[in-house]
Image: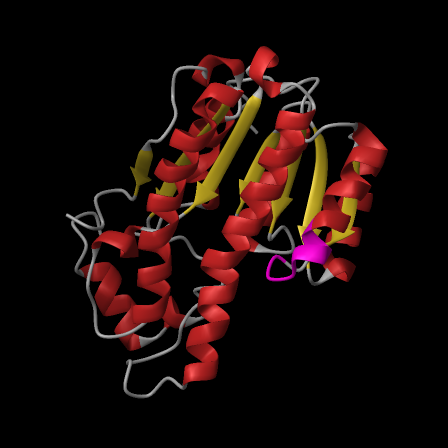
Amino acid sequence: MHIPHSLAGRTALVAGASSGIGAHLAELFAAAGANVVLGARRSDRTETLAAALRDAGHQALAVTMDVTDEASVKLAYDAAEHAFGTVDAIIANAGMAGGGRSTDVDAGRVQAVIDTNLLGVYLTAREGAKRLISAGSREKENGRIVLIGSITAEMTGQGDAAYAATKAGVAHLAKQFAREWIRQGINVNTVQPGYIRTELSGDWFDTEGGRAQVAGWHRGRLMDIDALDDLILYLCSDAARYVTGATLTIDDGQAL
């Protein structure tokens, strides 16, 4: 695993770390030398990954974290601080898809998408920022928060409207948070990935429709799971001290 930026001495919390991008980023942060906190509702999966990281010589902790529940988010940060001290790199990655066409998706599903993808990001970032400020981030300028968005925030399609809308909201949340916390030594940015094969995308790309979608892209391919590695490590490092309020897209030109 290529590690362009060391995060030794940092503590990173990855929300939504049970699978896909989140699980990969937890492994990445561990390889970069950070203490890693893996947050997810499915704690059995994060416990397995955290144990594997510890067996490999890394510092890792799995915590139960329902990002839609304020009390659960606070307890996750409490556990992280008890184990490693202040969390100074936060990845708000938890998310869920919205389903099909808007006329076919019930209100309960839409609300669940909003709660996970928007409220969950809000609560994860806000709680982390509050604790960073209390720990002196204004003087240390050590706060790094990365919100995981999506290129769907800037696209239209034949479905998944709630998902796309929440991801557009995530991008603006980052700008708003960056403005609010800029004098508190906290940098907040959004990374908007293109399509990567994960559990969230499921088996869609193995279907006829999925293959047709990929074939329509200029380069005709999905991105690899490590496509975001260099950028996210950079944003969480001291090298990114001047970068805040940015929306950064990595999509292999899929949205062009």
User: Looking at this view, is 21 or 216 the one in front?
Assistant: 21
Quarter of the N terminus within the rendering: top right
Q: Is residue 27 left or right of residue 147?
A: right
Q: Position of residue 232 (x, y in %)?
A: 47, 31
Q: Is residue 23 magenta?
A: no
Report the residue at 79% width, 42% height from top. Answer: 78
Indicate whether 242 appears above or below 167.
above
Indicate whether 245 appears above or below 150.
above
Q: Is residue 238 left or right of residue 47?
A: left
Residue 57 showing in the rendered view = no
Report the residue at 44% width, 23% height from top. Answer: 182
- Start-end of magenta stretch: 67-73
Q: Position of residue 109 (x, y in %)?
A: 46, 79
Report the residue at 71% width, 35% height from top. Answer: 36
User: Looking at this view, is 229 or 242 the one in front?
Assistant: 242
Residue 156 showing in the rendered view = yes
Q: Quadrant of residue 120?
A: bottom right
Q: Is residue 169 left or right of residue 225?
A: left
Q: Position of residue 134 (x, y in %)?
A: 68, 27
